[in-house]
Structure formats: C-alpha cells, structure tokens
Image (cartoon, helix red, strand yellow):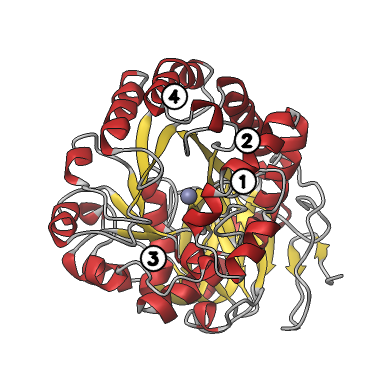
C-alpha cells in the first residue's frame, strides 16, 4: 500500500518509482465534501495546454506541439472547476489561503509532472468476456476477417452481453473505467455495440449510465448498434439498418441514453449508404455522429462530412484527397494504434501525413475485448511516438485537448485553464517526455476528477 496521509491541509504521497498504483475499490460520486478548494503545489512541469481565446478549437499542425508548460507551478480548484493557475510561490502568497487554510486541501506534488486528465475518446467497455480464443487463433496466423467469418470476432461477444443482466454489465464497465483512471484518464467515451438487439443495446447504454453514476469522472455515451450485422440478420443487412434507424436511435435519444451514434463503416461491416441512412436518423433524433472508418479498407469520407461527424476513427487507410478535405473540417481524426499493435498489423495510421496536412488528430485506446484490450493512454502515446512518429508533445495534445474536441467538450476539458473542469493527472516523472518513454509502465500517482481527489484509500479524502 502507498503511504497517503492527509493532515488538515497537506497531503504527502508516495515517492518510490517502484510503488504499486493505488487501488480504488469503490469511489463514490463527488459529494458535498468535493465543494471545497484544492491546491496542488510544487508541480515540476505543469502542462497547461492553454490556448489564447481567439485560437480556440482543435489543435492542428505545429499547434499540437504547444503544451504551455509552466514550471514550479500550482493549480487552485474549487467546486469542481479550475480557479487559477500560476507559480507556486505566487499562489501561496495569496492571502485568501492564509485566512482559511483549513478550507483548502493542499497537495505537495513534489516536482512531479501534472497534465490535464486524459480524454479517452473511443472505448467499448460494455462486454463480458475477454476473447482469448481469437487471440490464440490470430497468433497462429488467422486474420481479423477470417476469425470473424469462423464465428469469432465481434459476434462472439454478443451472446454473453445479450444474456447478461444490467448490473453484471455495469460491473464490467465500471471495472474498465477504474483501470483507465489508474492510467491517468478522467474522461471516457463509452460505446454499446455488443448487444445488437434493441433491448440489449439499450441495456448496454443503461449499464454505461449506471457505471458512470458510480465513477467521479466524466462519461460520454455512444450508441453503436451498427457495429456488425448480427447473425439473425445475415443477408438482410438493410433490414437491420432499418431497426437501428427506426427503433434503437429514437429510443436511445428519447431515454437520453446516448449523446452520439457511431457506425462501423468498412468492408464486412456497414456500407457508405447504410452509414448515411444511420447518420440521417441520428440527426433527426438530435444525436451527434461519429464513425469507425478505414480500418480494413479506405472508406470515401467526403459524402459523410456534410453530417459534421465529431470524429472519424481508425483511418489506417485514407486517401490523399480525403486528407485534404478533413483538414478543412473540425471532424477529428481519432487514431487508435493499440488495435494495430494487438492485431499485429505492420501498417499504422499515417499520423504524420495527417498532422502535416493540418488534420486535427486525437489518440484513444479503443479499449475492447477483440482488438485492443488496453486501458492505458500512456501506452497508446508510446505507440504513437514509436510507430506513428508523433512527437511526445503532439501525442499529449492529441490525448487531451483534441480528445476533448472529439467529444464536443473542448470548452470544458483537455487543458488546465481557469473555468475548465478540474480534471488532472499527476505522473511520477520529471519531464513530460518520460510519459511515452517508459512504455507499459504505470506512473500515474493520482488523478483529480471534476475536483475530486482519488487516493489509494479508495475514496475522496477531505479532512
Ligand atoms: Zn472501436
């Protein structure tokens, strides 16, 4: 166990690099104790990602390298929001704290690196089992598509989700949220997509809502009824798309269970025409849209841009004309190199080409049981650097501020600026470049989620 001790207005934490990460048994949703002030001091490097108001919007090109680093920094938070950011010395001089020191929880960050909590803008946590036989078959040489044709793949996760109760699903989803949080993630986009019936897709979304209610971070829900055509609709995909459009989408919207609708648009999944139909239905129900595109083959993107998707995800295959078009839009290109790593494919998404053309790029885990069972944004950052030639600074901006824009949260999340949500991740490193450098390593010492500090005691501690 770590050695958290909180005395009135100060908190020391573990400094051993080898120390195990804190476990978080059952953090409760922020309660009234959360509405007190929190002051983080002695931050070695604070990556603010701040941006002048006139340049608000997703980061592109060289803008991705601007981390707005402040050394010897401090951050003051209150009521779940960031109140001010500055030098430790100046913040401590502020008379307000001296008058009422007991009202402020002060945490000495011991010169560690602090950044905005990661925004993981693409995850599939609503599943029951890991897909271990797919894993073995792939090691023995079967491709993703061959495994799917033989009854594995996405469809093999469906039976268990259909049978599962909503509380069982909620447990699995919550476990996923906690693991992501242990790696520095404070905002998560969570998709349904392993039920593929009206009832089990709505059950998955309701389970996401239930898990989110027990986790102090921020969750954005996405209906992915169009993940794959279920076996009972084999050869009748148009009918299944009809079900997604006329039942799933309107019901999810009516019950306020989803903010976005996603489609797996690719060879072996849904066509461009199917996707347009689904996007029109989402628009009619007032939901935002996003799509999995270009994982197996290049999908023409231009016809979909008129729907203003929040993001196009994967983009392993994308043609040059579409890259040019994307650069002129606010649609984020969300790259998920964990899937490339886990599927053992040599080709990774062309991040350099996208960034150099001016496309706004984000990074996400694609946490799912088939192709990317990792909750770790730091590992994804490492892959982005080593396999997609993104600089550490670009990877960090892609995983924070651009992830926030990919969820329509750019004005609330993704940077450490006064007025934004108090979402922070503290890492036991001295230089931000160590984040992707120590790959497959757990160095997140603690996070702040909407102003709530999680300690290894398992809950918020405000004394
Ligand atoms: Zn995905």
Tags 1 and 2 in contact by the CB under 8 Å rule?
A: yes
Tags 4 and 2 in contact by the CB under 8 Å rule?
A: no
Q: CA distance from mark 1 to mark 2?
A: 8 Å
Q: What residue does disc 2 label?
A: 208
Which mark's residue is nearer the viewer, 1 or 2?
Answer: 1
Q: What residue does disc 1 label?
A: 125
Q: Relative to the observer, which residue lies in front, 261 or 30?
A: 261
Quadrant containing the N terminus in the rendered view: bottom right
Earlier residue among tags 1 and 3:
1
Circle 2 SS class: helix
Estimate the x, y position of residue 360 in percent, counting from the top left: 27, 58
Rate crowding at label 4 as few (under 14), some (14 to 19) or many (20 or more) other CA atoms within 10 Å.
many
Circle 3 SS class: helix
Earlier residue among tags 1 and 2:
1
Earlier residue among tags 4 and 1:
1
Earlier residue among tags 4 and 2:
2
Q: What residue does disc 3 label?
A: 397
Q: Relative to the observer, which residue lies in front, 404 or 223?
A: 223
Estimate the x, y position of residue 344 in percent, counting from the top left: 51, 71
Q: Quadrant of residue 207?
A: top right
Rate crowding at label 1 as few (under 14), some (14 to 19) or many (20 or more) other CA atoms within 10 Å.
many
Circle 4 SS class: helix
Q: Relative to the observer, which residue lies in front, 194 or 338?
A: 194
Q: What residue does disc 4 label?
A: 240
Q: Is mark 4 within 8 Å of ligand 1?
A: no
Q: Is residue 192 visible?
A: yes
Residue at left 52%, top 65%?
Answer: 343
Which mark's residue is nearer the viewer, 3 or 2?
Answer: 2
């Amino acid at each position: 166990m770590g050695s958290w001790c909180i005395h009135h207005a100060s908190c020391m934490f573990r400094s051993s690099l080898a120390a195990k990460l804190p476990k978080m048994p059952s953090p409760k949703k922020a309660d009234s104790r959360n509405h007190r002030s929190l002051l983080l001091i002695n931050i070695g490097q604070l990556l603010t990602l701040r941006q002048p108001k006139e340049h608000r919007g997703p980061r592109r090109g060289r803008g991705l390298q601007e981390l707005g680093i402040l050394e010897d920094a401090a951050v003051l938070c209150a009521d779940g929001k960031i109140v001010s950011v500055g030098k430790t010395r100046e913040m401590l001089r502020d008379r307000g704290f001296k008058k009422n020191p007991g009202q402020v929880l002060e945490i000495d960050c011991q010169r560690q690196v602090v950044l905005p909590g990661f925004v993981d803008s693409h995850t599939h946590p609503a599943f029951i089992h890991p897909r271990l036989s797919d894993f073995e078959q792939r090691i023995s040489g079967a491709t993703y598509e061959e495994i799917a044709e033989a009854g594995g793949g996405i469809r093999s996760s469906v039976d268990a989700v259909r049978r599962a109760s909503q509380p069982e699903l909620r447990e699995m989803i919550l476990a996923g949220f906690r693991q992501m949080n242990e790696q520095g993630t404070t905002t998560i986009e969570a998709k349904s997509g392993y039920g593929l019936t009206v009832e089990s897709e709505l059950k998955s979304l309701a389970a996401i809502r239930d898990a989110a209610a027990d986790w102090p971070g921020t969750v954005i829900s996405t209906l992915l009824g169009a993940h794959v055509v279920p076996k009972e609709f084999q050869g009748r995909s148009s009918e299944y798309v009809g079900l997604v459009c006329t039942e799933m989408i309107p019901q999810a919207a009516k019950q306020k269970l989803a903010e976005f609708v996603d489609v797996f648009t690719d060879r072996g999944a849904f066509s461009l025409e199917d996707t347009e139909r689904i996007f029109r239905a989402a628009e009619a129900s007032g939901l935002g849209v996003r799509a999995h595109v270009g994982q197996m083959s290049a999908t023409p993107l231009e016809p979909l841009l008129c729907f203003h998707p929040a993001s196009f995800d994967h983009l392993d295959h994308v043609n040059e004309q579409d890259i040019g078009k994307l650069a002129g839009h606010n649609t984020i290109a969300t790259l998920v190199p964990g899937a490339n790593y886990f599927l053992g494919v040599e080709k990774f998404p062309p991040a350099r080409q996208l960034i150099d053309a001016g496309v706004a790029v984000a990074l996400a885990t694609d946490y799912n049981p088939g192709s990317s069972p990792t909750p770790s944004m730091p590992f994804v950052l490492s892959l982005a650097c080593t396999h997609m030639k993104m600089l550490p600074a670009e990877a960090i901006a892609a995983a924070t501020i651009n992830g926030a824009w990919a969820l329509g949260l750019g004005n609330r999340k993704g940077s450490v600026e006064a007025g934004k949500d108090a979402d922070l991740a503290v890492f036991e490193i001295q230089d931000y470049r160590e984040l992707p450098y120590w790959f497959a390593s757990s160095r997140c010492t603690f996070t702040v989620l909407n102003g709530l500090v999680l300690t290894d005691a398992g809950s918020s501690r405000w004394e």
